[in-house]
Every structure is written in structure tokens, then in C-alpha cells.
Image (cartoon, coloured by chain):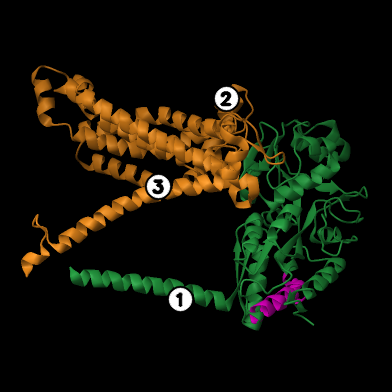
Chain colours: A orange, B green
Amino acid sequence: MMSNCKSPAGIDRSEKRFTWILTASGAFIVVLLIAIFFTLFITALPAIKKFGLTFLISKSWNATAESFGSLPFLVGTLLTSFLALIIAIPFSISISMFLGEYCKEGAISNFLRSAIEVLAGIPSVIYGLWGIFLLVPLVRSLEMQLGIVPYGVGILTSSLILAIMVIPFSASLGREVISLVPGDLKEAAYSLGATRFEVMKNIVIPYARSGIIAGILLAFGRAIGETMAVTMLIGNSSFLPTSIFSPANTMASVIANQFSEATGIVASSLIYIALVLFLVTTIVNIIGNYVIHKISIEASKEVT
Amino acid sequence: MKNLFSKVRFLTLLFVFLATGFQAFAGDQELLGAGATFPQPLYSKMFDAYYQQYKVKINYQGIGSGGGINQLTKKTVDFGATDAFMTAKELTEAGATVIHIPTCLGAVVVTYNLPGNPKLNFTPDVVADIFLGKITKWNDPKIAAANAGVKLPNLPISVVNRADGSGTNYIFTEYLSKVSSAWKEKIGAGKTANWPAGQIGQKGNPGVAGYVAQTPGAVGYVELIYATQNKMAYGNVKNKAGKFIEPTLKAVSAAANVKMPDDTNVLLTNTDAANGYPISSFTWIIFYKEQNYGGKAKERAEALAKLLLWTVNEGQKYVEPLQYAPLSKEAQSKANKLVRSITFNGVPLLK
């Protein structure tokens, strides 16, 4: 009797079921992704038909004239996210090196690590509020000293808050990979007379590079999609930004602002923006995977 | 293993049962409404009072005017609520006759942050020019002309608008389109507008109010209720009759003391009313005139009709304590007539 329940490979039925459930869950994710894409595509169809691909390069967002284009928001999203990354990268790499190599154990290390975890868990609306009460006046006084229009809110302010929000993501992944660098490699370098800095520069960083970059890309993905804090700090102006101090709008913030009251072609154009955002995120992820793959091959060549 | 699977199956069944059971329950017992957020505090109070008295539950969701119109057109709610009268296109899309009844009035005030926060007088031109970015300093002679005796500082004006689509935007931009041809041409009227470059937008009344409170020299616009509740400084606006009117509940109600069409499709901005505040508006509840649709029970339609009648009569006593402006006599009689025109299979539901 027992032998009937077993497949030729010797797997019993519960084992099979388990495999089946896992496969189904995996497939479900793919189906979900495709379903999201098609829902966006179908609901955006009126806007796609009306504006076509010029939507991507059109600068006007005029609800009264019903002419819509996503360029200001695309630029706003990419600009704030890149700026945030540029601000965040030095900090997150230093933090990951410090916690992954220089201060691996002990009270300070534990405290810092949990502080970073707390930072990652704070709801974004709190970051937004903090930005309004602290960052906005700071940026405003900076702008007054520079003699430009003191908006206080704008691209720079949002990028600063985004940088703080994304540091935990890249730092904790960076720490993880740096602490995984094999001791043999480092010891070999030390035995050849390398200083600590040289070991970091020539062994640890190249070895951990793909992980560090993965962390940065994760941070970028988070920055692109961030909505609440940015909406509160960016100034929500639907024009192409002229400087990093000017008010702007991101794809996520314009959707958050306008969707609740939107009908007809406005709603459909907003969904078109969501579709663009979806595609941008996908492209960033694909590029990310490619970069990680390529760098990890190079790194393994360099180190070994 | 087998045990686990039967548990899973049981749980799934339980879930399905609960979900469907809950829906059926909710559908039978409650009237469903959705729409404008502006009158939501009032509706919550009214519907709660109505429940205490008549034991009819009303579930109202503040999802925005656009959402309210959408939900009604999709027939997923018994009534919707909106701050702007439905457009001709929206009415066509609704498929059958939709009735609007006004429930109360709201107003939009111009709020600012100046040293000492003096009470300012605004002419329509000045409001339009400030928000068009033509007047850039507080001591501009145009502002000073209407404010003799007020010491205006030499401060740059930072303009902040409502970035999210809202009834407040609609009322404000519609008013300015009426009084300024330059505004009508460049910005227009709508729930979201084509704001001039370089202006800050903030989300919601709190967003605008927060930015104004924080920025010396800032000017913005918020709902009257929001401004009074938060003790913000706001200005008087010159009405069509040439008087500077302080936005009070009385002045807002007075704006509706004008002749209006039977369907109450009237914009109360810049009306002829001598003592009316010029940036006022109705907020409406919307519903289908013929209630026999989508397999709706007659009892349910009757419950709705009774609720609506109550809202524009006894319910009005809840309006003023919550800082909304009550319906004018004219508006109330029109609303009564409209509620009484509601039918089921062509037969009026109320006598």
C-alpha cells in the first residue's frame, strides 16, 4: 500500500503537495505582476490613445485644457532619487564599513545597528512632518543667504529627507556583505604587509562590491516610489524644475495629490503616470540585476 | 499532513462564509453613501443623530467628490455627495436623471501670515493678481489702496495653492474666473488648476495652512471652517455689491439669497446678494430620481427618501453648531421640492 503513494523518484504525496504549493506561490507572484501591469494599461488606455508616447516628453500638465504630459514628474522623480542617492552613498558606505569591519561587536555596534533598524521602520509621514518642522526652515534660511526665492520646500529638501530614509536600506545590506568577506583573504593581505586601509580598499570592498551596489539599488527603488514624505516637502508644482531649489512634483506625489478627485481623462492620465512609474522601477531593477551580475563576476576574478 | 489540509480547507470555507455573510448583512441593513470630504464631519453628526432617532444606519465614506459621483454612477452607493454640481458629461454618463439637493454651504477664505496679522480687505482684482503672481510684495499700492490705516510690510508674497484635487480649489478658481478675465484665460476653473510656475502647492487644508503658518509673507486659501477652527488670519473680500464682507456663517448663507433654478444648479460665487460673502458654495447630496434600479427594495428607497427629507429640514439644526453655513430659505424650499420628486416605479415615494 505504502509503495502506491510514492512516486517513482521516491517522493511521497505530502512532499509533492508541498512542492506544488511552493510552485503555485511562485507563479502567483508572476501572475500578480502581470495583472498589475494589465490593470494599469487598460485603465490608462484612453490617455495612451490620446497622448501616445509624446506623453513621456510633454512638459504640460494642464487640467483645464486637458493636455497632459509626464516629463516634469519623471524628471522630478529621477532628480530627487539620484540626488538622494548621491547624498546617501558616502554615509551608507561608511556606516557599512564601520559596522561590518571596524566595529563588528560590542555595545556601540549593537546600539548603532538597532538605531539603523529603527530608522528603516519609521513611517514616512513622520519623516515628512519632521522635514516640515526642521528641514524646511533650515533650507529656507540657506536659500535666504544664497539670495534665491526662499520656498523652503523643493527638490533639495525632498532629496535630503529621501537620503535619510534610504540610508538604512543600503547600510544594512552593505554591513551584511562586508562582514561576510572571508577572514582568510584579509589575513593573507595583512601577512603581505597591507595596512587596514589597503585591506579595505583592495580586498573587502571589491569582494563585497556587488552586495554594496545591490543595497544602493534597493535604496534607489525605495526613493523612486516614496510618496508621503516627498508630497509634503516637494512643493507640488507641475513644472520642469529649473534648479535643485525649485518646487517640483514626482510621479508618486502627483498621483497621491490628484487621484482622489480625478475623473475621465485626468484619472486615466494619472494612471498612465503610474504605468510609467511601474516601468521605470522595472527598468531600474533589470539594470540593477545586470550590474550586480557583471560586477560579481569581475570581483571574483579580481580577488581570486 | 492530511489533518493540516482539512484545517486549511475549513479555514478557507469559514473565510468565504464570513466575507459573503458580512456583505449580505451590510447590504440589507445600511444605507450607503460616499463622496465629498468637506461636509463629512457634518454628515457623520447628522447620520448618527438620525440613527439614534430612527434606527436606520447610514455608512458614509469621505472619498472625495469625484469618487462620490463615480460610485453613484456605478450604483454601488445609495447616494453620493459632491462639492461641485455634476457636469453635463457626468450627467450623461449617469444614464438616468440624477437629483442634487443642497445640504449646507461652505466658503473659501484667503489666509495669510503677516506681522501682527491685521484684518485685510481684498478686492477681487487684488486676489486674482496675487495668485497670478502679478502682485509680489505686501506693500504693493494695489493692496494698500483697499487697506487704509494698515501698515503693510515690505515682504515678498509667497503664494501657496492646494495641490490636490478638491472642491475648495473648484470654488476658489471658479470665483476668480468670474472676476478676472486674465485668470479665466491663464488658469481657468477646476478641481485642479493650471497654476503659474514657481508656486508652492500643498496637500489638503492642513498642508496649505501649515505652510502659511510657517512662512512669513505667505498667502493661501482654505475652507472657512478650517480657518476658524484653527484661529487663522483671513481677509474680507469685496462682493459684487461693492461691500467688503467678512466671511461669517451668516454672510455665507446670505450668498444663497438669490434666485436659483429648480435643480439648484447655481454657483454661489460673486452673487448679487448684497450681504453675501462672494466665495461661497453649496455642497450637494446626489441620488437617482427613479429609485427602482439594480434590484433595490422599495423599503430601502423609502428609507433613503425619508433620510434626505430629514437632512434638509430637521437635520439643518446640526449645521450651525459644526460651523457650516445653513441653507437659506430659498434653498431649503427648493431642496424640499427636489426630495419629494423622488420616485419608485414612477410613483412618488413621499407624500
Instruction: Inspect the image, locate mark 2, and give the three-letter code of the amino acid beneath it.
Output: Ser
Q: Is residue A122 visible?
A: no
- Is A267 left, or right, of B95 in this rendering? left
Disc 3 chain ID:
A
- Residue drawn at point x = 43 percent, y = 37 percent: A281
Labels 2 and 3: the sequence-earlier one: 3
Q: Specify the segment rendered in magenta.
A: B299-318
Q: Position of residue B289 (x, y in %)?
A: 74, 70
- Which residue is outermost to the top? A193
Residue at 76% across / 74% down in the picture?
A: B342
- Pick the residue in front: B112 or A266: A266
Write down the residue under mark 2: A243
Image x and y of residue A289, in percent: 31, 33
Question: Which residue is labeled 1 in the image?
Answer: B21
> In the visual, does A35 lie left or right of B335?
left
Name the residue type under label 1. Answer: Gly
Q: Is residue A118 above or below residue B339?
A: above
Q: Chain of mark 2?
A: A
Q: Which residue sits at x=53%, y=47%?
A: A42
